[in-house]
Amino acid sequence: MEDDLSIIFEPETQPLPVKDETYDEIFAKAGITEELRRPGNYFLVEQAVEGVVELWPIPTEIVVDGASYELRENGALISTQARVNSEAEVGSRSIVERGANIYREVQIGSACVIGAEAVLKEGVWLTNSVQIGARVVVHEGAYFNNHAVIGDDCIVGENSSVHAYSKVGDEVRIEDKVFISSYVELGDYAFVGEGAQIDDHSLIGNSANIAKHSRIGRRVQVSAGVHTKERQKIKDGSWVVSYAGRVVNNPPRKGTGESEA
């Protein structure tokens, strides 16, 4: 070894581009800075002796606020109190919190968060940056696209899907074979019946009930507490009010609460 050697290892690729605040916060509390994170199961530690930088293995477990996490080679953090089936896949920079139960053939993409005591059953698929809240139960074959957010205490039925940037509130029940398009918002305590479809940019109010096999068009606003009818079809741009599911074809003028002529 030459006397002026200052580094004996260089990763072939750049450090992982970690941007998720929760993920960064966990590493910060564990005392592992971004500069020390590298792809693969290693980081660099500078030694005082002769200024040599040696290759040390990264810890396989870290402790944050009393909670222990397994740190995988791809940077995924798995609570030591979570159950992850050996046939499940957890992507880079994803977090699985305590008490979560991940069944076989579940696929979790990168930068996802699985909340405490959440259950993902067989064949569930999350792409990237999906957030699943605490105590959520997701049944077989459900699918979640990029940046979808599911609140706490929700139930998602078999073969249902929630697409990109849609947000589901707390204690929402989504039954089987439901299709929720992109940029949809469901308020707290909402219910979506079997086979229903909600198209993109629609807003479903708190405690609204979307009946089974109904179709909610694009940019529809369903007011809080509304119950639609089974197989009801709501046209694009409509505003749905009252418990009878009355449809107003034009949304209210701003600040008036009245429909435009």
Image: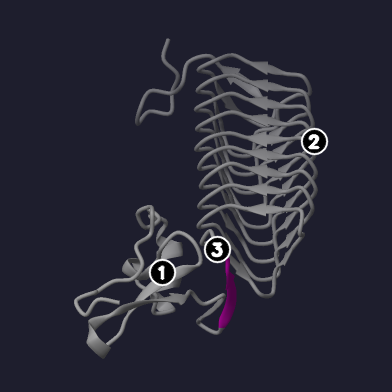
Query: What's the residue at 35%, 72% (across, down)?
Result: 33
Looking at the image, is 172 positioned above or below residue 238? below
Task: Of the two numbered discs 2 and 1 on the same chain, state the one appearing first in sequence.
Answer: 1
Residue 205, horizontal then vertical, whole percent: 57, 38
Query: Which residue ends up furthest to the bottom in the rendered image?
Result: 49
Q: Is residue 178 left or right of residue 70?
A: right
On-image quarter of the N terminus: bottom left
Q: Nearer the viewer, residue 116 or 102?
A: 102
Q: How crowded is mark 2: few (under 14 residues within 10 Å), some or many (20 or more)?
A: many
Q: Nearer the viewer, residue 140 or 12?
A: 12
Residue bearing mark 3: 73
Numbered range of the magenta stretch:
67-72
Q: Which of 58 and 27 is in front in this view?
A: 58
Q: What secondary structure is marked by label 3?
A: loop
Looking at the image, is 257 positioned above or below residue 140? above
Query: What's the residue at 53%, 28% (across, down)?
Result: 202
Amino acid carrying label 3: it is Glu
Question: Which dot marks residue 25?
Answer: 1
Residue 26, horizontal then vertical, whole percent: 45, 71
Amino acid carrying label 2: it is Asp
Q: Indicate yes or no whether the magenta region holds residue 148.
A: no
The CA span between labels 3 and 1 is: 19 Å
Question: Which dot marks residue 131?
Answer: none
Question: Which dot marks residue 176?
Answer: 2
Nearer to us of marks 2 and 3 is 3
